[in-house]
Each structure stands twice: as structure tokens, then as C-alpha cells.
Amino acid sequence: MKSGFRQSMSWVHTWGGLVVGWILFFIFLTGTLGYFDTEIDRWMKPELSSANASLTQSLRVAEARLQQQAPGAKRWFISPPTNRDNPQLRIFWEMPGEDGKRGIIGNELLDSFTGEPVTARATGGGRALYEMHYALHYLPSTLAYWIVGICSMFMLVAIITGVIIHKKIFKDFFTFRPKKGQRSWLDMHNLLSVIALPFHLMITYSGLIFFVFTYMPLVITSSYGTGADAQEKFFDELFSETEKVQPANLPANLSSLSNMATMAETHWGSNQIRYIDISYPGDANTRVSIGRNLHSPLRASPEFIFNGATGELLNNKAALTSAPRAVRDVLLGLHEGLFADLGLRWLYFFSGLIGTAMIAAGLILWVTKRRPQQLSKSQGPDFGHRLVESLNIGMILGLPLAIAAYFWANRLLDVNFSARSEWEMHILFITLLVVAFYPFTRSRLVKQTFINTIQLSWIELLWILSFAYGFLPLLNTITTERSVFKSITTHDWLFISFDIIFFVTSVIAGLTARKMQKNLQQRVHPSVNSSNIKSISRQELTQ
Amino acid sequence: MLIFKINTAMKQQTDQHYRWKIIGRVTLAIIGGYILTNLTSILIYFLLPLPKSDAVMTAMLLSFSIYTGVVIWVFSMRSLRSVFWMMASVIFLMSVVILTLQFFRRLGI
Amino acid sequence: MLLALGLTYLSCLAFAISLKRHFHQLFSSHRLFRKHTFIFKSLGWILLALSINASVQLYGFATGLVVLCGLFSAAAFLIALLLPYSPRTIIGIGSSSLVLIFIWFI
């Protein structure tokens, strides 16, 4: 290969990173936002109130609603407001299916006081953003999982090769030398990778583990055979589902859920109930499993299992059953961060942003390094280089802008528009596409050198980004009841935090735009500075 | 003029040669790596003295580290030819071992 | 959480000082000897151990370690970004965290 180990690894890191960099940026940014998916859900449904009824009341109305919507179901699932990750009352049901197929499923978000479904605007919300980071969008899910998996595998190799080629990893730990062009971008890329290295390694590896049963099926087929139920047998053994509930086909009333919940609470303390899972409600063999809130990276929780008809406690199932399964649960738990309280969730968010920025810095480093050579070519830069420059703009600026558009659409689309949640997403992707084609379109409209087109595209789009986020708090005030003043006076921290984040993003985008503008002017007219800038004509500056 | 033409032709040939080498390495790393990783994981499953589902889970947990290691190995060797032959022989040997183990398992030994 | 953050910050600071380039960025008038490097590096490790202890006591073992990784990234990022732009701020934040930690203990 190349003349040395480090050079080969450098080649793998650079080219492997480039090929999947844009998709990884997408995955990282949407995933990072996913740490606050419940909060984004609430922001995108401003009609929702945050007040919740007591556990007993919630369970009562949930059961009544489930009985109304899904009598004779195979499974009822209640997520009460005591679920720390999702503090709203949600119900889910699955009807019995025919011929081994899955029956009709449904879910509803309920008002915990009345049991009526909440009437809020239809939106994918934060949940849709988070789901995109592993299931993408517009693609069949298995295909999306494979694409994401391949990109994650490339990322894993990139991390390891990155560590290999980073010679002075400890000496250069805090090194950042700004205003030195390519060197600065390399410093930034290195800095962002190294300070959050445990996070990047964990998130990538655990991300792969999420779908390991899809990615490495041959291990299962060689041990459990290729039969149709081979996978199911493996899962049953791994997750210790040794006794499967069979319906007795005898009707029986469901015993008091509140009593069972209270019994669980005496052991766990109050506000610890994460879910209540009911198999075959209304049957004599009905089982009720109550799970606890997560407190550690271990993603499994202990369960109390009751005989649903009599209310008798059958089993206190421990969270840990086997070491390999525990390793998997801890890895997945670390990735999802569901156990995290608010402070730790912010740290996760911050680390995710570091990862996203690291990828962006890498992509920008790639083009910055090759620009001098490319620009000196007689025919102008190669098609490949121009493609990378455009894709960089399209993803690094396009995705944040697209997310802003998503939020704008959420506030502006009519509440009664039936397809509004799909259209919010369409608008997100249309914006992404528009920004990706921005440099190309601009070059057709305004004849300039390639490098000027690219740099002016960056500057203009940054200003647009700054405006898009800066105006959001005002848009919120105009279109909803939750104005900035109201949020401050009612101490609605959620809305206040969102407004702050929007403002900060806007400011960062604006400052970057201004800085790039100044740099560009300096480069074009080195004699221009703030004192004589007014006397030089605009035409001269944008030459 | 002729020498110039021969030189550019030679350069094009080396460029082409280089390109095929790259394609070869990447294919070997990705596809060969996937095969090798799966075989190694299956071997790990057979050799671990754990209950079935635990052994399978452990093998799967390790699989991505193995894959990464294989990819780095493919790119670290100087000669593409030797990487190819080494990988082919390891895959062959592993398949033989696994088939033997499966055969004996089925017989109940 | 703030205590752990303060300790982590100081730990990172100590590590940074032990590195030649950053020492000169922070204290341009002094000279750095090998024994100083050793002192600052050990100080860095001790402070890191203290912040691990604080974090684990507050959150439990597993969660505590996770919190610490996050805090360390945040502290390192802050220092790395401040070093080229305003080294004085770093010292300022360092001294105030030292003071706050003392107050917390008393």
C-alpha cells in the first residue's frame, strides 16, 4: 500500500471518513437532538399542558380508555406520567393477529385527568427527528438500518485509525491554534475527537450493537439453525422469557392496577413506575408486569409480575440475568441515556454536539487541504472537489437550516391540515435539497470564480441560518400562546431553554458569517480595514 | 514525441493499476473482512464454555472489534497479494474447523 | 455536580500547565523546569481522582463515571478554547473554582 503503516491508516481515515461523512453528520445531529426528543415534542405541541394527575387517577382513566378502544386485546401497555423519560400518560395496544401475523396496533397520548386523547397538533415532533437518526426517512427500515450500520462501521474504523495516526495525542491534547487555516481546522478536528473520545467510541460501538442481530445473522443461523423461529428461540433464551403467557380463553376481570402499582411502590419508592405491561387483559391468565425507572446505564429494570386476574404477586424478576446480556444492556443504556437526569442529559447533548462538530471539522479540513492545489488547476477544480464543497455546504449548513425550517413549519402550517406531520418532514428535506444545490444555482445566476461562489454561499447561508433561528422566539410568540414574556413569568423552563438555544445558535451563525466576510474582504483587498472601508465601492469589494 | 506518448501511456497504466489496487484492498477489507468476522464469531461461539444464548451474544458483541481489526490489518500489509492469500487460507481453515465442530456437535460428541 | 465540575476543571488546568506550550501561554514570564512538570502532572491526577470520587459519591458508580466523562470533555473544551484567546480568563475561572470549593468544604 503506502510507504508506511501511519500513511496507510491516514489514507483509510481520510477517504473512509469522507465517503460517509455527510450521512454521519446527519446521524449525529439528529441523534444529539434525540436526547431531548420529549422536550422537542412538547415544544412542537404548545397546546399541551405539563400538569399531570396522580398515578391512581392516571391508571384509572388509562384502563377505561383501553377497555373502550381495545377490548380483547393481546396486549395493553401503559406508560404513566411517572416515567421519567416521558412524563405523559401514553397507552399502546396490540390486538390478536391471524395466522401468526401481528394484529392491529394503536397508541394514544391521554390527558391524565380525563382520559381523553390529547388534542394537540399532529406532528412527528422530536420523536421523528430522533427516529431519523437510525431509520433515516423515505426508506424501508431494513435498508436504512443497513446504511446506518455501514456508516457506523466506517466511523468505528475511522476512530481507531484516527487514534493510530494522531502522534502527539497527549502533548497536543489542548492544542488549538486559530487563524492558521488548515492547521487550525486540523487542531479543531483533533481537539473535538480527543476530548470526547470515550463518548465517540461508546456511541459508535453501542450504535452497532443496537442492530447486531440484523448485521451479523450468520452467528445465529449457525447455532440455532435456519428455521423460521430460530431467531425467536435465541431471543427467548437470551432475555429469559422462558414462560410465555398463553390465553386461557376464560373471561376474568382485571384486578386493580392501582393496588399492584402501590405494591411496587412500597418496594421501589414513589414515582418509580416506568411502564405497566398487560398480556391478554380480560383473560383468566392475564399477566401484569410493572417495570421500574432506570437509574443506571443498565437498560433493563427489575419487574414485578402479577397474576392480573387475582392481583397476586407471581415473580420479582431481576434486571440482570446473564453477563453478556448485561454488557449489551449497559452499552445500549449508555447510548440512549434514558437513565440520565437533566444535568447529565445536557452533558450528553453537549458531547453529541462535539461529535457533530468533529465530523463537520473533518469534512471542512478535507476541502481546505486540497483547495490550493485544486484552484491552481487550469480548468478549475475537479468535479469531485466541487461536489465535496457543495455537499459540505448542503449538509453542514443545510441540516441545521432544515431543522429550523421544520420548526417554522410546525408553527406556520395550519393546525387542521391533516397531512401536516408528513409535510413538516417534507419541508425539512426540501430545505436540505435546496441548500445542497445553492452553490450550483448561485454559480449559474452570478458569474464568479469557483472559490468566491463557495465562500459567498457559506456567508449568505450563515446569515440566513442566523435569521431563521433568531426569528424563532418571535415566531413562537406570534403564533402560539407561549410568548417569551409568558414563559419567563410562568417559569416555563422548557420554552425558555428553547428560546435561549435558538438565540445562541443565531448569534454563533451570525458571528461566523461576519468573520468569514471580514476574512474574504481582507483576502481580496488587503489594504481595506475598518477605517477606509466606507470609501471603497461595493462593486470593488465583491469582485 | 513517441517517448512522450509512451510515457503518458505508461502513467495512465500505472494510474489504472493503482486504481485496481485500491478497489482490491477495499473489497478485501469490506467483503473479505465481513466473511472473516462472521467465521471468527462463529468459532468463538463454539469455543466458549457458556450457555448457548450467552455464547452467541458474546460472539456478537466482539464481532465489531474483530471486523475493525481485520480492516486495519488488510490496509497495513504492504503486498495486496499476500493479504489476499493469507485471508483466503484463514477463511478456508476456519470453515473446515467450523464444519468439523458442527459435524461432531450434531453427532452429539 | 458543580463541585465535580470545579474539580475536573482544575484537574484539566493542571494537566495543561504541565505541558510546555500551554505553560508559556499562561505564564509567559516564568521558566518551566522538569520538576515543575512533574508537580503539575501529579496535581492533575490527584484532582481528577478527587472529582471521580465526588461524582461517584453523588451519582453512584456507573452513572458517576458517565457524568465525569461528560464533565471532563466540557472542561477540556473550555480550556482549549480559552488558551489561545484569553489565558487570563482561565486563571480567573481556576481561582474562583478553588475559592468556591474551599467555601463548599467549610
Image (cartoon, coloured by chain):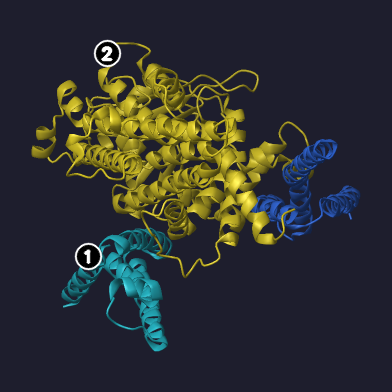
C40, above or below A39, in the image: below
Q: Residue A50 carries which label?
A: none
* Tag 2: amino acid: Asp
Residue A330 visible in the displayed image: no
The quarter of the image holding the C terminus of chain A is top left
The chain to which mark 1 is attached is C
Q: Label 1 vs label 2: CA separation?
A: 49 Å
Outermost residue, bottom direction? C35
The residue closer to the viewer here, C55 or A309, is C55
Residue C9 visible in the displayed image: yes
Instruction: Name the residue tied to disc 1.
Output: C89
Percent of width and height locating residue A26: 47, 36
* Tag 1: amino acid: Thr
Which chain is depicted blue? B
Instruction: Tell me if mark 1 has few (under 14), some (14-19) or many (20+) residues whose alpha carbon lies within 10 angstroms of its own.
Output: some
Q: What element carries label 2?
A: loop
Q: Chain A is drawn in which colour?
A: yellow
The residue closer to the viewer here, B28 or A226, is B28
Q: Is residue A263 left or right of residue C102?
A: right
The chain to which mark 2 is attached is A
The residue closer to the viewer here, A340 or A259, is A340
State how many labels appear. 2
Percent of width and height locating residue A239: 59, 46
Instruction: Name the residue tied to disc 2.
Output: A414
The residue closer to the viewer here, A47 or A314, is A47
Which chain is depicted cyan? C
Percent of width and height locating residue A342: 30, 49
